[in-house]
Amino acid sequence: MLKTLLVLCLTVVAATAATVRVPSEQPTIQAGLYAALAGDTVLVAPGTYLERVVWPAVDGITLLSEGGADSTVISAADSGRVVTMNAIDYTTATRLSGFTLTRGSVATYPGNGAGLWCRGAPEIARNRIVDNQLTTMGFGGGVYAQGAPLFHDNLAAWDTIANEGGGGWRYGAGVYCTGSGVFYQNAFVENAGLGGAGGFWRGGGLYLGGGTPVVFANLFLGNRMGTTTGGIAYGGGLYVDSADAYVVNNTFSANVCSTAISYGGGIYVQRNWSAVVKNNILAGNVCDGLGKNAGAIAAQPDTLGDTLTVDYNDAWANSPNDYYGVRVGPHSLGLDPLFVTGSLGEYYLSYVGAGQPETSPCVDAGDTVMTSPVNVDSMLRAWTTRTDSVPDAGALDLGYHYRATELTGISGPKRVASRRHYSGPSIVRGTLLLPSSLLTIHHSLFDLDGRRVAELQPGANDVSRLSPGVYFVTSGRSAVIGERSAPDKVILTR
C-alpha cells in the first residue's frame, strides 16, 4: 500500500510540472519565477533583460534559457545585484542555466556577489558571469556562494572588487564560496582585486572558505589580486582557507599576486588541514612586490605538519620561484608542459599520437583521484587533453581536461581572449614572432625592474641572448606617432 501511494505521489508531481515561458506568457524573468512552482521550468527566450532578479523561497525551480548564455542576457545595468538567490537553502533541484549575468554593481557593505548571491546547494551551470563589480570591500565580485553549489561549465570573467578607499578586504574577485561546493569545467578569467592601497587581497579567481570543496578540471587564467602598493595578497588564482579542499587537474596560467607582500601567484593554502593539491599545471604565474613568495603554490608554513599534500604538479616558468611553505612531493615536475591549441582552446597537451612533434611531459604523469563522493576519475577519463579528442587513458594526464565537444549555447568560455585587467603572460620559447600585418609596429621589451632590454622589429626576433624570466612588452604604431599600448607580460623560456 505504501509503495502504491509513493507511485501516485510521484505521478502527481510529474503531471503538474509546468513550463512558464518568458516573455510570451510572463513579461519578465521575475514574473516568470513568481508564477512557477517546485518542479517547474521558467524558459526564457533569447534577448537582453534589464532586471535585478530575486529568486522566490521555493526550491526546485529551473531557470533556463532557450538559446544559451551567448544570446540570453540578464543585466542589472550597474544598479544592484543581478540575481539574488538567498531566501532559503536551495538544493540541486534548483537550477540556473544558460544566461549571461552582467553589469551587477554593489556599493553597500558587505558587498556580497554583484553578479549572483546563492545559498545552499543549487546547480549553477553554463552561464557567463562577467563584468560585475563590488565597489566596497566584500566577498565575491562575480558570485557569493553561501553553501555548497554545484558550479560547472561557467565562465567567470572580468569581475572585480574595487574598494577605492583602501584597507579592508577583497576576497574572491571572481567567486567566493563558504562551503563544500563542487567546481568543474569552469573558466576563471581575468577577475581582479583593484582599488586603493592596503588591506587584504585573497583569491583572484576563486576563494574557498570552508567545508570540503572539490575543484577539478578548471582553467584559472590571468586573475589578479592586489596593486603594486600596500597590503598583503594571497592566491592570484585560488585561495584555500580552512578547507579540506581537493584541488586536482586544473591549469593555472598568468595569475598574479602583486602587493607590498604577496604569496602564491597561482594557489595559496591558508591552513593545511588535509587539503590535496595534485595533478595541476601551474605555468607562468607571477608573485610580485617587495616581499614575494612563490609564483606557483604558497602555504601557511608547516602549521599542521604534513597534512597538506602537494605532489604530481607541474610548476614551470613561475616568477620569482615555484613554492613557498610547501613540502613538495617527489613526483612533482618543473618542465615545459608543451601547451598546444586545439578546437576549444589553447591548453591542450602536445602529443605525438595527435600529430604534434613531441609528447608533453604532463601526459600520463598524474596520480589517481577520488571516486567518492564525486567520481572525478570517471569524469576526467570521459574528457581529453589531446587535440584529436581521444579520451584520457592509462595514468591520468596533468592539468585541465577539455570536453570532447563544446556544449551548445556557451561558445567560447575556454577560448576567451585577454581583455582588460591583465594580459599574459604569454609563453615564448626563444623567439618572439610578430605577424606581417604589424609591419609598422615596433616592440620594446622591458625586465621587471623597468629596464629596456631589447628593441624588437617586425618579423622574427631572436631573444635567445636574454635570460629566461618574466618581461614586459609594449608596442607602438610608429616612432613619429609614439602610440603605445598597455604593457603585456611574457614569459621567456628555453
Image: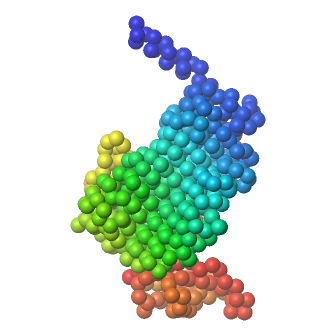
Q: Quadrant where the C terminus lies?
A: bottom left
Vertical comparison of 401 with 420: above or below: above
**Residue nearest the viewer, comparing 453 with 31:** 31
Q: Residue 6 location, x and y as percent?
A: 45, 14
Image position of 186 (left or right of 84)? left
Image position of 393 (left or right of 176)? left
**Residue nearest the viewer, comparing 437 with 418:** 418
The residue under the point 59% across, 72% down is 197
Image position of 276 (left or right of 8)? left
Q: Quadrant where the N terminus lies?
A: top left
Vertical comparison of 57 with 427: above or below: above
Vertical comparison of 425 with 119: above or below: below
The total number of labels drawn is 0
The residue under the point 39% across, 61% down is 270
**Residue nearest the viewer, comparing 405 with 259:** 259
Vertical comparison of 244 with 432: above or below: above
Q: Residue 327 location, x and y as percent?
A: 27, 67
Q: Residue 187 location, x and y as percent?
A: 51, 57
Q: Is residue 309 visible?
A: no
**Residue nearest the viewer, comparing 195 with 486:** 195
Q: Residue 33 location, x and y as percent?
A: 66, 33
| Residue 29 position by quadrant | top right
| Residue 415 position by quadrant | bottom right
Which coloring applies here?
rainbow
The residue under the point 33% across, 64% down is 313
